[in-house]
Image (cartoon, rainbow, N blue to C red):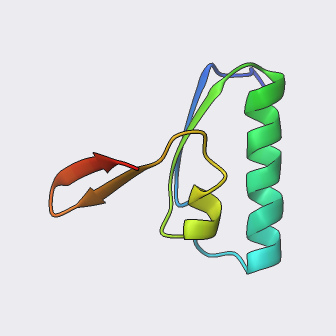
Amino acid sequence: LLRGPALLLADEPTGNLDDETGRRVMSLLLRLVDEEAGTLVFVTHSRELAALADETWRAHSGEFERL
C-alpha cells in the first residue's frame, strides 16, 4: 500500500471484523484508492459494503451478473 498500487485486490477485507471496524477499514481503503487514482476490487458477502462500490457483480453457481 505504501507504493500506491494502481490496482488493489481484497478478498473479504472486513470478514473477521466487527461492523464499526469493518466500515472504518473500507473507508480507509476507498480513500486510499481515490487519493491515488487507483482501483479497488473487493469481494464481500456484505450488501452494505457492496453498496459502496461504483460497480457491483454477483457470482452465483459459477455465473457472474452485473447488478
In the figure, 42 relative to 9: above or below? below
Which residue lies at the image location 41% right of the left edge and 50% below the top edge? 67
In the figure, 63 relative to 24: above or below? above
Q: Quadrant of the N terminus?
A: top right
Q: Position of residue 48 (x, y in %)?
A: 63, 67
Q: Is residue 1 visible?
A: no
Q: Is residue 65 found left or right of 41 in the rendered image?
A: left
What is the residue that sits farthest to the bottom in this orientation?
A: 18
The answer to which image quadrant residue 58 occupies is bottom left
What is the residue that sits farthest to the front in this orientation?
A: 67
Q: Is residue 23 visible?
A: yes
Q: Position of residue 5 (x, y in %)?
A: 65, 22
The answer to which image quadrant residue 16 occupies is bottom right
Q: Position of residue 13 (x, y in %)?
A: 61, 58
Which residue lies at the image location 73% right of the left edge and 19% below the top edge? 37
Q: Position of residue 3 (x, y in %)?
A: 74, 20
The answer to which image quadrant residue 39 occupies is top right
In the figure, 65 relative to 5: above or below? below
Which residue lies at the image location 82% right of the left edge and 75% below the top edge? 20
Q: Which of the two residues, 10 or 55, is positioned nearer the viewer here?
A: 55
Which residue lies at the image location 67% right of the left edge and 52% below the top edge? 52
Q: Is residue 3 found left or right of 7 in the rendered image?
A: right
Tally the numbered discs: 0
Q: Which of the two residues, 50 or 36, is positioned nearer the viewer here?
A: 50
In the figure, 53 relative to 40: above or below? below
